[in-house]
Amino acid sequence: MQILSVFDEAFRPYGRVVEGYPVEGILKALAETPCTDAVVYEPRIEALHQAENAEEIGTALFGGMPFQFGFCNGVNTKLNCLEWHRDSEFNLGTEDFILLIAKQEEIVDGKLDTAKVKAFKAPAGVLVECYATTLHYAPCSAKLGQGFRVLIGLPLNTNTDYRPGGGANVMDKMLWARNKWLIAHPETGEAAQGAWVGLEGENIDISADI
């Protein structure tokens, strides 16, 4: 799979590189968070909020709205699922990491062909915004077997427990958590747990490409 850079022109429909913020304090706090072979996500980590300049940066990124800084850490090379929110998500890694992403408008009748998924590498220390219409999931390792620590900045309470069930339409049936719509590949644990199965084609694995 071709892996482009978030600085590449091709990334523009999906997001942007965010410049001008002093992120060194956040990176220092992020480096202290645990990283194992399993992918672990935590919506809000107090140590990240207490990091130097974190509150000022988060307030600026979300325009004064309540926000949360958490992390997604681990080792990963597979797509598995795609999710999206009603708001942008901000990512910042202590190591290089790769985003597997697509566009919400590429979902047709509740299905998305994984051939439409693109891969973009974000260098360590570079803050990246993924727009609300950009489908994404857990980051991937930039080197085979290498762990990643990635800041996940989102509106407060995103990804917390909320699953009403049912729904008036297909989109409602994709709601998997608060402010988190998700479509899963049939091979995944999320599918086995009842997530909307909407990814068709290969469950992308970039292990041969990194």
Image (tube, grey):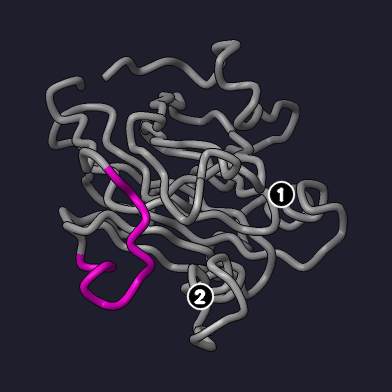
The residue lying at 46 percent from left, 16 percent from top is 5
Left or right placement of residue 84 versus residue 94 in this view: right
The span shown in magenta is 189-200
Q: CA distance from mark 2 to mark 1?
A: 29 Å
Judging by the rendered image, the residue that carries numbered circle 1 is 53
Judging depth in this view, the residue of 70 and 163 nearest the camera is 163
Amino acid at dot 1: Asn
Judging depth in this view, the residue of 187 and 132 nearest the camera is 187
| Image location of residue 146, percent across then percent down | 19, 36
The residue lying at 52 percent from left, 64 percent from top is 181
Judging by the rendered image, the residue that carries numbered circle 2 is 177
Amino acid at dot 2: Ala
103 is higher (above) or lower (below) than 159: above
Query: Which of the marked residues, 2 or 1, is nearer the chain's N terminus?
Result: 1
Dot 1 crowding, Cα within 10 Å, few <14, some 14–19, many 20+: some
Judging depth in this view, the residue of 24 and 43 nearest the camera is 43
